Image (cartoon, rainbow, N blue to C red):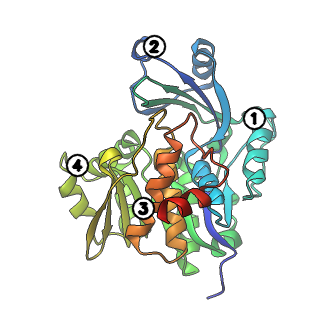
Amino acid sequence: MAEPRFDVAGIGNAIVDVLANADDAFLTTHALPKGAMILVDEAQAEKLYGAMGPGIESSGGSAGNTIAGLASLGARVAYIGKVNDDGLGKIFRHDITSIGATFDTKPLSGEISTARCMILVTPDAERTMSTFLGACTQLGPDDIDATLIQESKVTYVEGYLWDMDAAKQAIVKAADHARNAGRKFSLSLSDSFCVDRHKAEFLDLVNNHVDILFANETEIMALYDTDDFETAAKAVQGKVELAALTRSAKGCRVVTATDMTDVPAEPVTHLVDTTGAGDQFAAGFLFGYCRGYEPKLCARIGAIAAAEVVSHFGARPEVSSLAELVKEKLG
């Protein structure tokens, strides 16, 4: 097999994030389920945007954040996602290419604007997201670059994409290209509400397409219809090559076909915003995987990356180099 051109190709919703502080009363007033992600239309997005306090705008999207973390670790990365050729779309394209990612997806030019996500961070650092998908809804099979997938060691997909029919076809196409080229396919379950919406299809993906699965405690329990984490961990064992199950402050459970290993969380001195914690954990884990590290070390790097991102506002690394931070932490 030829040496891959990229370590990881990410496929996701290309979204510009708008982050602002809020209290629980604000969430109640606007009927927003705390800690979850809901989809809104453009009118709802404009209304919520107008009611929010001062915010920070930055390129986001779950898989996009993971690709940014991987780039900061020194990985070779590419991204597939749909934006409009509008102001926000140009911001997104500039941001992701400036970190060294290849991003060649053809933009839209029309009335459907680039996606945005209003992220409200409460004093307990929990994030509640309202997402207008906009141009993301137009991502389809024709946007999947077969050569790019074949030249990537791992293709990483966010579960949020499964909310659009055309994107479902794109994901299956990417998974088939990865499998046929002898590469790996990785999925993040993204959100327990997302799992509830697509449980049967996600189970089919996990059983038949996924090599590396990322999920948090709530998501993996939702997938297997149980309120017991141990039961869910045993249920996924053997279904995929690797499952990385994050448990916030309790760390991570790494599940292989023959073993389960618990890896502690990296201590966080000052918790500010949990946005992007799972995305950056995936970045660290995949970086280690692509370097051939054993799963426990992959999870350790993931924990370091996640701890960095929750110590500040925003879903992407703020340190000049995650690679240097990991080197410092690991010694």
Residue behind mark 2:
26
Q: Give coordinates of residue 208: x percent, y percent.
A: 39, 69
Give, as a three-letter code, the residue at label 4.
Asp
Residue 212 marker: none
Q: Are marks 4 and 2 in contact (CB under 8 Å)?
A: no
Residue under the point 58% across and 36% down: 314
Seen from the viewer's position, the closer of residues 312 and 274 is 312
Residue behind mark 1:
88
Instruction: Name the N-terminal-most of marks 2 and 3.
Output: 2
Instruction: Name the N-terminal-most of marks 1 and 4.
Output: 1
Instruction: Name the N-terminal-most of marks 4 and 3.
Output: 4
Residue behind mark 4:
225
Residue under the point 65% across and 49% down: 139
Q: Is residue 46 left or right of residue 262?
A: right
Is label 3 or label 1 in front?
3
Classify 10 Å Cα crowding around label 3: few (below 14), some (14-19), many (20 and above): many
Question: How far apart, in angstroms, are the residues tagged by discs 3 and 1?
Answer: 35 Å
Residue behind mark 3:
300
Q: Give coordinates of residue 255: x percent, y percent.
A: 31, 67
Question: How far apart, in angstroms, are the residues tagged by discs 1 and 4?
Answer: 39 Å
Give, as a three-letter code, the residue at label 3.
Arg
